[in-house]
Amino acid sequence: MRNFLKDGTVRHLLLALILVGCAASQNFLHHGERIVFLGDSITQLGVKPNGYVTLISDTLRTNYAGMNAEVIGAGISGNKVPDLQVRIQKDVLDKKPTLVFIYIGINDVWHWVTPGLKGTTKEDFESGLREIIGAIQKNGARVVLCTPSVIGEKNDGTNPEDSMLNEYSDISRRVAIETGSRICDLRAAFTEYLKSHNPSNEEKGILTVDRVHLNDAGNQFVAEQMLNILEK
């Protein structure tokens, strides 16, 4: 029987396939990226000097100057998934992005327990995410979908909205998989971090200023999670 592994053509083909696979896994960040960060007040604040959007922009400019990446913040306070659906054309698609980070879900949950406001049903949350992602992908851009982070920083599962946040995070994970999007699992990352960095089980002050919005450490933490996606 012929030994195909000794055949030069086959050897070269196998080597080419390996190299292509390695390149594909290492080059998620492309030259000339236009990256839009879509979200709520966390992202709106993220464009401030110490915000996570600015930190990512600074890192790309310093470490990947040749990439010529452009970063655009598109966060609006109080936004939920239905709000993103309304403004997706103006605030995202018209910007001609190549990559979009969607960081949403906090208000979709939090507004269920906020007087005078209404959250987003799980059904509308899921269908809305699918519509938003579909529109972005149809325009040729890739999507990174983030799970919602925290509403309270207690590490023992006693934050009042923990259970609902976990349910909505599961929806985001499933939607990311089924739409071929990358997942940035902030919910899991925050939960794991707080287990080892919140020994007094405080409800705020570790990564947030008010149980939700990020302090300097929180902005740095989120930037690191997102850069991990970009640099893979």
Image: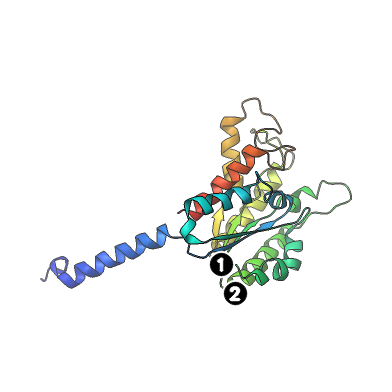
Total labels: the figure holds 2
Q: Quadrant of residue 213?
A: top right
What secondary structure is found at the residue carrying circle 1?
Answer: loop
Residue 83 lies in quadrant? bottom right
Report the residue at 60% width, 74% height from top. 139
- Left or right of residue 204, residue 185 in this image: left
Q: Residue at x 60, y 34 (%)?
A: 194
Tell me where residue 220 sits by quadrant: top right
Task: Name the quarter where the C terminus is drawn.
Answer: bottom left
* Image side of residue 200 versus residue 13, left or right: right
Where in the figure is residue 136, as x and y percent of width and height?
Answer: 62, 69
Colour scheme of the picture: rainbow
Q: In this picture, is 191 found above or below 38? A: above
Residue ID at (56%, 73%): 140
Q: Position of residue 175 (x, y in %)?
A: 60, 61
Q: Circle 1 sits on which residue?
A: 98
Please tell me how crowded label 2 is: few (under 14), some (14-19), or many (20+) other residues with Cα within 10 Å: few
Residue 221 or residue 123, whichever sits in front: 221
The residue beneath circle 2 is 138
Q: Secondary structure at mark 2?
A: helix
Q: Nearer the viewer, residue 72 or 164?
A: 72
- Extreme-top residue of the structure: 200
Separation (CA) of disc 1 from disc 2: 11 Å
Identified at 15% across, 70% down, the residue is 8
Specify the amino acid type for callout 1.
Thr
